[in-house]
Image: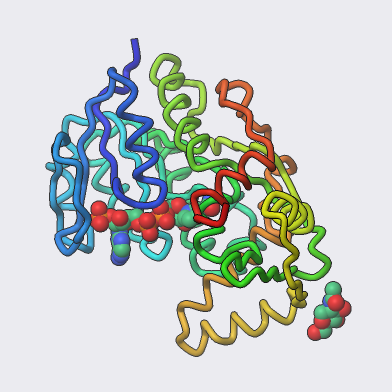
Amino acid sequence: MSMFKKVILIGATGSIGSVVLAALEKEPSFTITLIQRASSKAKMPVHFKTITVPDSYPTDELIPAFEGHDVVINCMTSFSVADQFRIIDAAIAAGIRRYVPSEYGLNYMRQDAQALNQVFNDKGKIQEYLRAKAQAGVIEWMSIACGMWIRWSMANDFLGMHIGERRFVFWDDGEGYFSCTTEENSAQGLVKALLVAGTDRDVYKNTVIYLSDFAITQKQLLEAIERIQGVKYTTESINSSDLIAEKQAAVAAGDIKATFALIETGFVTGRYGGHLEKEGEIQNDKLHLPKNTLDEVVEAALKAYGTI
Ligand SMILES: NC(=O)c1ccc[n+]([C@@H]2O[C@H](COP(=O)([O-])OP(=O)(O)OC[C@H]3O[C@@H](n4cnc5c(N)ncnc54)[C@H](OP(=O)(O)O)[C@@H]3O)[C@@H](O)[C@H]2O)c1
Ligand SMILES: *[C@@H]1O[C@H](CO)[C@@H](O)[C@H](O)[C@H]1NC(C)=O
Protein backbone atom coordinates (compact mmCIF):
# COMPACT_ATOMS: atom_id res chain seq x y z
CA MET A 1 0.00 0.00 0.00
CA SER A 2 1.40 3.35 -1.02
CA MET A 3 1.80 5.89 1.75
CA PHE A 4 1.60 8.67 -0.81
CA LYS A 5 -2.06 9.18 -1.64
CA LYS A 6 -3.03 12.83 -1.59
CA VAL A 7 -1.14 14.79 -4.22
CA ILE A 8 -0.96 18.53 -4.89
CA LEU A 9 -0.11 19.52 -8.48
CA ILE A 10 1.07 23.02 -9.40
CA GLY A 11 1.03 23.97 -13.10
CA ALA A 12 -1.49 21.30 -14.11
CA THR A 13 -2.29 22.74 -17.54
CA GLY A 14 1.31 23.50 -18.55
CA SER A 15 3.48 21.68 -21.12
CA ILE A 16 4.59 19.00 -18.66
CA GLY A 17 1.95 19.53 -15.93
CA SER A 18 -0.82 18.39 -18.28
CA VAL A 19 1.09 15.19 -19.10
CA VAL A 20 1.89 14.59 -15.41
CA LEU A 21 -1.80 15.08 -14.55
CA ALA A 22 -2.81 12.50 -17.19
CA ALA A 23 -0.28 10.01 -15.75
CA LEU A 24 -1.40 10.65 -12.15
CA GLU A 25 -5.03 10.27 -13.12
CA LYS A 26 -4.39 6.72 -14.40
CA GLU A 27 -3.40 5.68 -10.86
CA PRO A 28 -6.57 5.15 -8.82
CA SER A 29 -4.63 5.33 -5.53
CA PHE A 30 -4.03 9.07 -5.91
CA THR A 31 -6.38 11.87 -4.92
CA ILE A 32 -5.32 15.00 -6.78
CA THR A 33 -5.71 18.67 -5.84
CA LEU A 34 -4.70 21.41 -8.27
CA ILE A 35 -3.25 24.81 -7.37
CA GLN A 36 -3.92 27.68 -9.76
CA ARG A 37 -2.77 31.32 -9.68
CA ALA A 38 -5.45 33.97 -9.34
CA SER A 39 -4.51 35.59 -12.66
CA SER A 40 -4.34 32.27 -14.55
CA LYS A 41 -6.57 32.03 -17.63
CA ALA A 42 -6.04 28.27 -17.90
CA LYS A 43 -9.17 26.09 -17.95
CA MET A 44 -8.66 23.58 -15.16
CA PRO A 45 -10.25 20.12 -15.63
CA VAL A 46 -13.49 20.40 -13.64
CA HIS A 47 -13.40 16.95 -12.04
CA PHE A 48 -10.51 17.92 -9.74
CA LYS A 49 -10.56 20.09 -6.68
CA THR A 50 -8.81 23.35 -7.61
CA ILE A 51 -7.56 25.85 -5.06
CA THR A 52 -6.81 29.38 -6.26
CA VAL A 53 -3.91 31.23 -4.64
CA PRO A 54 -2.40 34.70 -5.17
CA ASP A 55 0.11 34.87 -8.04
CA SER A 56 3.10 35.18 -5.70
CA TYR A 57 2.32 31.83 -4.01
CA PRO A 58 2.46 33.29 -0.48
CA THR A 59 3.42 30.73 2.17
CA ASP A 60 0.57 31.60 4.56
CA GLU A 61 -2.09 30.97 1.89
CA LEU A 62 -0.46 27.77 0.69
CA ILE A 63 -0.28 26.14 4.12
CA PRO A 64 -4.05 25.54 4.50
CA ALA A 65 -4.23 24.43 0.83
CA PHE A 66 -1.45 21.88 1.38
CA GLU A 67 -2.67 20.54 4.75
CA GLY A 68 -3.76 16.90 4.68
CA HIS A 69 -1.74 16.12 1.54
CA ASP A 70 1.29 13.82 1.23
CA VAL A 71 3.06 15.07 -1.88
CA VAL A 72 3.55 18.34 -3.78
CA ILE A 73 4.50 18.00 -7.45
CA ASN A 74 5.60 21.28 -8.97
CA CYS A 75 5.38 21.76 -12.75
CA MET A 76 5.56 25.55 -12.75
CA THR A 77 7.02 27.59 -15.60
CA SER A 78 10.83 28.08 -15.86
CA PHE A 79 10.99 31.77 -14.96
CA SER A 80 9.02 31.30 -11.72
CA VAL A 81 11.00 28.46 -10.15
CA ALA A 82 12.48 30.74 -7.45
CA ASP A 83 8.92 31.08 -6.05
CA GLN A 84 9.51 27.58 -4.74
CA PHE A 85 11.36 28.87 -1.66
CA ARG A 86 7.97 30.06 -0.37
CA ILE A 87 6.20 26.95 -1.65
CA ILE A 88 8.68 24.61 0.07
CA ASP A 89 8.31 26.55 3.34
CA ALA A 90 4.55 26.05 3.09
CA ALA A 91 5.00 22.34 2.30
CA ILE A 92 7.13 21.89 5.42
CA ALA A 93 4.70 23.85 7.62
CA ALA A 94 1.77 21.80 6.28
CA GLY A 95 3.52 18.47 6.92
CA ILE A 96 3.97 17.46 3.26
CA ARG A 97 6.07 14.31 3.12
CA ARG A 98 7.65 14.59 -0.31
CA TYR A 99 8.31 17.55 -2.60
CA VAL A 100 9.05 17.28 -6.33
CA PRO A 101 10.57 20.56 -7.59
CA SER A 102 10.02 21.99 -11.06
CA GLU A 103 13.24 20.80 -12.75
CA TYR A 104 12.74 18.34 -15.64
CA GLY A 105 16.11 19.10 -17.19
CA LEU A 106 19.74 18.43 -16.38
CA ASN A 107 22.06 18.17 -13.36
CA TYR A 108 21.46 21.54 -11.70
CA MET A 109 23.99 20.82 -8.94
CA ARG A 110 26.80 21.55 -11.42
CA GLN A 111 28.41 24.90 -10.78
CA ASP A 112 29.03 25.45 -14.51
CA ALA A 113 25.31 24.95 -15.20
CA GLN A 114 24.32 27.33 -12.38
CA ALA A 115 26.72 29.96 -13.75
CA LEU A 116 25.31 29.72 -17.29
CA ASN A 117 21.88 31.30 -16.70
CA GLN A 118 19.43 32.44 -14.03
CA VAL A 119 16.94 29.59 -14.48
CA PHE A 120 19.61 26.90 -13.98
CA ASN A 121 20.91 28.89 -11.02
CA ASP A 122 17.45 29.16 -9.44
CA LYS A 123 16.80 25.44 -9.93
CA GLY A 124 20.17 24.63 -8.38
CA LYS A 125 19.53 26.88 -5.37
CA ILE A 126 16.09 25.29 -4.88
CA GLN A 127 17.63 21.81 -4.90
CA GLU A 128 20.27 22.97 -2.41
CA TYR A 129 17.45 24.33 -0.20
CA LEU A 130 15.65 20.98 -0.38
CA ARG A 131 18.87 19.11 0.43
CA ALA A 132 19.35 21.27 3.53
CA LYS A 133 15.73 20.77 4.67
CA ALA A 134 16.00 17.01 4.07
CA GLN A 135 19.22 16.98 6.11
CA ALA A 136 17.26 18.66 8.91
CA GLY A 137 14.68 15.89 8.59
CA VAL A 138 11.68 18.14 7.90
CA ILE A 139 10.81 17.03 4.35
CA GLU A 140 11.83 14.52 1.66
CA TRP A 141 12.26 15.40 -2.02
CA MET A 142 12.98 13.83 -5.39
CA SER A 143 13.45 15.49 -8.74
CA ILE A 144 13.29 14.43 -12.37
CA ALA A 145 16.22 15.02 -14.76
CA CYS A 146 14.90 13.99 -18.18
CA GLY A 147 17.01 15.99 -20.64
CA MET A 148 15.14 17.52 -23.57
CA TRP A 149 11.66 16.86 -24.88
CA ILE A 150 11.94 16.69 -28.67
CA ARG A 151 8.24 17.36 -29.31
CA TRP A 152 8.26 20.48 -27.12
CA SER A 153 11.57 21.55 -28.67
CA MET A 154 10.21 21.25 -32.19
CA ALA A 155 7.20 23.39 -31.33
CA ASN A 156 9.42 26.00 -29.66
CA ASP A 157 12.30 26.22 -32.19
CA PHE A 158 14.70 24.68 -29.69
CA LEU A 159 17.82 22.52 -30.15
CA GLY A 160 18.58 24.31 -33.44
CA MET A 161 15.34 23.13 -35.08
CA HIS A 162 13.45 25.65 -37.22
CA ILE A 163 11.05 23.21 -38.84
CA GLY A 164 8.81 25.82 -40.48
CA GLU A 165 11.81 27.34 -42.30
CA ARG A 166 13.54 24.00 -42.94
CA ARG A 167 16.57 25.50 -41.26
CA PHE A 168 18.87 23.97 -38.64
CA VAL A 169 21.43 25.72 -36.46
CA PHE A 170 24.39 23.77 -35.07
CA TRP A 171 26.15 24.81 -31.89
CA ASP A 172 29.82 24.56 -32.98
CA ASP A 173 30.25 21.23 -34.83
CA GLY A 174 26.86 19.83 -33.71
CA GLU A 175 28.62 16.84 -32.13
CA GLY A 176 27.85 17.45 -28.44
CA TYR A 177 25.73 14.72 -26.84
CA PHE A 178 22.51 15.52 -24.96
CA SER A 179 19.90 13.20 -23.47
CA CYS A 180 16.24 13.15 -24.48
CA THR A 181 13.12 11.70 -22.88
CA THR A 182 9.58 12.00 -24.21
CA GLU A 183 7.13 14.10 -22.22
CA GLU A 184 5.13 10.90 -21.58
CA ASN A 185 8.12 8.96 -20.21
CA SER A 186 9.14 11.93 -18.05
CA ALA A 187 5.65 12.04 -16.50
CA GLN A 188 5.36 8.26 -16.19
CA GLY A 189 8.82 8.06 -14.66
CA LEU A 190 7.75 10.57 -12.03
CA VAL A 191 4.50 8.78 -11.24
CA LYS A 192 6.12 5.32 -11.12
CA ALA A 193 8.91 6.60 -8.87
CA LEU A 194 6.26 8.09 -6.59
CA LEU A 195 4.49 4.73 -6.39
CA VAL A 196 7.76 2.93 -5.59
CA ALA A 197 8.72 5.57 -3.02
CA GLY A 198 5.27 5.42 -1.45
CA THR A 199 5.81 1.72 -0.75
CA ASP A 200 9.50 1.91 0.20
CA ARG A 201 10.31 5.38 1.47
CA ASP A 202 14.07 4.87 1.16
CA VAL A 203 13.95 4.36 -2.59
CA TYR A 204 14.22 7.58 -4.62
CA LYS A 205 14.44 9.57 -1.39
CA ASN A 206 16.28 12.91 -1.53
CA THR A 207 17.70 12.24 -4.97
CA VAL A 208 17.65 13.21 -8.62
CA ILE A 209 16.00 10.57 -10.81
CA TYR A 210 17.83 10.46 -14.14
CA LEU A 211 15.72 9.50 -17.16
CA SER A 212 16.90 9.18 -20.75
CA ASP A 213 15.32 7.46 -23.74
CA PHE A 214 18.57 8.10 -25.65
CA ALA A 215 21.46 10.54 -25.95
CA ILE A 216 22.04 12.08 -29.38
CA THR A 217 23.93 14.86 -31.15
CA GLN A 218 22.38 17.70 -33.15
CA LYS A 219 23.81 16.10 -36.31
CA GLN A 220 21.97 12.85 -35.54
CA LEU A 221 18.78 14.80 -34.86
CA LEU A 222 18.93 16.64 -38.18
CA GLU A 223 19.77 13.43 -40.05
CA ALA A 224 16.62 11.79 -38.62
CA ILE A 225 14.42 14.81 -39.40
CA GLU A 226 15.63 15.05 -43.02
CA ARG A 227 15.29 11.34 -43.62
CA ILE A 228 11.78 11.05 -42.12
CA GLN A 229 10.51 14.26 -43.69
CA GLY A 230 12.26 13.51 -46.99
CA VAL A 231 13.63 17.05 -47.37
CA LYS A 232 16.97 18.82 -47.06
CA TYR A 233 17.45 21.61 -44.51
CA THR A 234 19.73 24.61 -44.82
CA THR A 235 22.29 24.54 -42.03
CA GLU A 236 24.39 27.09 -40.24
CA SER A 237 26.71 26.98 -37.29
CA ILE A 238 27.15 29.30 -34.31
CA ASN A 239 30.13 29.55 -32.01
CA SER A 240 28.85 28.62 -28.55
CA SER A 241 31.43 30.67 -26.63
CA ASP A 242 30.53 33.78 -28.62
CA LEU A 243 26.81 33.07 -28.20
CA ILE A 244 27.12 32.67 -24.43
CA ALA A 245 29.05 35.96 -24.11
CA GLU A 246 26.51 37.77 -26.32
CA LYS A 247 23.41 36.40 -24.55
CA GLN A 248 24.79 36.87 -21.03
CA ALA A 249 25.52 40.51 -21.93
CA ALA A 250 21.98 40.87 -23.29
CA VAL A 251 20.49 39.46 -20.07
CA ALA A 252 22.67 41.81 -18.00
CA ALA A 253 21.30 44.70 -20.10
CA GLY A 254 17.74 43.70 -19.21
CA ASP A 255 16.76 41.35 -22.07
CA ILE A 256 15.43 38.47 -19.95
CA LYS A 257 14.32 36.55 -23.07
CA ALA A 258 17.99 36.04 -23.99
CA THR A 259 17.94 33.47 -21.16
CA PHE A 260 16.19 31.01 -23.50
CA ALA A 261 19.27 30.76 -25.75
CA LEU A 262 21.40 30.16 -22.65
CA ILE A 263 19.07 27.38 -21.50
CA GLU A 264 19.23 25.87 -24.98
CA THR A 265 23.03 26.11 -24.98
CA GLY A 266 23.09 24.35 -21.62
CA PHE A 267 21.46 21.31 -23.14
CA VAL A 268 22.59 21.17 -26.72
CA THR A 269 26.34 21.54 -26.28
CA GLY A 270 26.38 18.64 -23.83
CA ARG A 271 28.91 20.53 -21.72
CA TYR A 272 26.69 21.56 -18.79
CA GLY A 273 25.32 18.28 -17.48
CA GLY A 274 22.71 17.63 -20.17
CA HIS A 275 24.34 14.33 -21.19
CA LEU A 276 22.65 12.54 -18.33
CA GLU A 277 24.33 9.16 -18.87
CA LYS A 278 27.46 10.91 -17.56
CA GLU A 279 25.70 12.47 -14.56
CA GLY A 280 24.03 9.49 -12.88
CA GLU A 281 22.41 6.10 -13.30
CA ILE A 282 19.55 6.15 -15.81
CA GLN A 283 16.36 4.75 -14.25
CA ASN A 284 14.22 4.00 -17.34
CA ASP A 285 14.64 0.22 -17.09
CA LYS A 286 14.18 0.06 -13.32
CA LEU A 287 10.95 2.03 -13.70
CA HIS A 288 9.86 -0.15 -16.64
CA LEU A 289 9.37 2.82 -18.94
CA PRO A 290 8.48 2.07 -22.57
CA LYS A 291 11.45 2.29 -24.95
CA ASN A 292 11.50 5.00 -27.62
CA THR A 293 13.91 5.28 -30.55
CA LEU A 294 15.05 8.59 -32.04
CA ASP A 295 13.16 7.83 -35.26
CA GLU A 296 9.91 7.10 -33.43
CA VAL A 297 10.16 10.26 -31.36
CA VAL A 298 11.10 12.48 -34.33
CA GLU A 299 8.28 11.03 -36.43
CA ALA A 300 5.70 11.60 -33.68
CA ALA A 301 6.97 15.16 -33.14
CA LEU A 302 6.83 15.97 -36.87
CA LYS A 303 3.26 14.64 -36.92
CA ALA A 304 2.31 16.72 -33.87
CA TYR A 305 3.90 19.73 -35.59
CA GLY A 306 1.73 19.05 -38.64
CA THR A 307 4.67 18.58 -41.01
CA ILE A 308 4.08 14.95 -42.01
N1 LIG B 1 12.96 19.10 -20.65
C1 LIG B 1 12.46 19.99 -21.48
O1 LIG B 1 12.58 19.87 -22.70
C2 LIG B 1 11.67 21.15 -20.92
C3 LIG B 1 11.00 21.99 -21.80
C4 LIG B 1 10.22 23.01 -21.26
C5 LIG B 1 10.15 23.18 -19.89
N2 LIG B 1 10.86 22.38 -19.07
C6 LIG B 1 10.80 22.56 -17.59
O2 LIG B 1 9.58 22.00 -17.14
C7 LIG B 1 9.03 22.81 -16.08
C8 LIG B 1 7.63 23.26 -16.48
O3 LIG B 1 7.72 24.02 -17.67
P1 LIG B 1 6.47 24.14 -18.65
O4 LIG B 1 7.01 24.61 -19.97
O5 LIG B 1 5.68 22.88 -18.60
O6 LIG B 1 5.68 25.31 -17.95
P2 LIG B 1 4.55 26.24 -18.61
O7 LIG B 1 3.69 25.41 -19.50
O8 LIG B 1 5.20 27.43 -19.21
O9 LIG B 1 3.76 26.74 -17.32
C9 LIG B 1 3.25 25.82 -16.38
C10 LIG B 1 2.44 26.54 -15.34
O10 LIG B 1 3.24 27.38 -14.53
C11 LIG B 1 2.35 28.15 -13.75
N3 LIG B 1 2.95 29.45 -13.47
C12 LIG B 1 3.45 29.86 -12.28
N4 LIG B 1 3.91 31.11 -12.33
C13 LIG B 1 3.67 31.54 -13.58
C14 LIG B 1 3.92 32.79 -14.23
N5 LIG B 1 4.47 33.82 -13.59
N6 LIG B 1 3.55 32.89 -15.53
C15 LIG B 1 3.00 31.85 -16.19
N7 LIG B 1 2.73 30.66 -15.60
C16 LIG B 1 3.07 30.50 -14.31
C17 LIG B 1 1.05 28.24 -14.54
O11 LIG B 1 0.04 27.52 -13.82
P3 LIG B 1 -1.46 28.13 -13.57
O12 LIG B 1 -1.81 28.93 -14.78
O13 LIG B 1 -2.28 26.89 -13.39
O14 LIG B 1 -1.34 28.95 -12.33
C18 LIG B 1 1.40 27.51 -15.84
O15 LIG B 1 0.34 26.82 -16.42
C19 LIG B 1 10.02 23.94 -15.87
O16 LIG B 1 10.90 23.60 -14.83
C20 LIG B 1 10.76 24.01 -17.18
O17 LIG B 1 12.04 24.57 -17.07
C21 LIG B 1 11.60 21.33 -19.54
C1 LIG C 1 34.73 30.37 -30.98
O1 LIG C 1 35.24 31.67 -30.96
C2 LIG C 1 36.35 31.87 -30.06
C3 LIG C 1 36.69 33.34 -30.06
O2 LIG C 1 35.59 34.11 -29.62
C4 LIG C 1 37.50 30.98 -30.48
O3 LIG C 1 38.55 31.09 -29.55
C5 LIG C 1 37.03 29.53 -30.56
O4 LIG C 1 38.07 28.71 -31.09
C6 LIG C 1 35.79 29.38 -31.43
N1 LIG C 1 35.30 28.03 -31.31
C7 LIG C 1 35.01 27.26 -32.35
C8 LIG C 1 34.53 25.90 -32.04
O5 LIG C 1 35.11 27.64 -33.52
Drawn side of residue 4 relative to residue 199, left or right:
left
Residue 296, percent from left and from top: 64, 39
**Which of 166/54 is in front?**
166
Q: Residue furthest top?
A: 1
| Snapshot quadrant of residue 281 | top right
Drawn side of residue 129 relative to residue 8, left or right:
right
Quadrant in the picture for the N terminus: top left
Q: Residue at x 50, y 90 (%)?
A: 253
Looking at the image, is 298 positioned above or below residue 56? above
Residue 303, percent from left and from top: 53, 49
Drawn side of residue 117 relative to residue 213, left or right:
left
Q: Residue at x 41, y 47 (%)?
A: 16
The way the protein has been coloured in the rendering is: rainbow
User: Within the displayed image, which quadrant is ligand 1 positioned in?
Assistant: bottom left
Residue 85: tell me if it is visible.
Answer: no
Drawn side of residue 75 relative to residue 169, left or right:
left
**Which of 268/122 is in front?**
268
Residue 2: tell me if it is visible.
Answer: yes
Residue 153, percent from left and from top: 55, 57
Q: How many marks?
A: 0
Q: Residue at x 27, y 32 (%)?
A: 7
Looking at the image, is 93 positioned above or below residue 57? above
Q: Residue furthest bottom?
A: 253
| Snapshot quadrant of residue 83 | bottom left
Q: Residue at x 66, y 33 (%)?
A: 282
Residue 256, percent from left and from top: 46, 79
**Which of 182/90 is in front?**
182
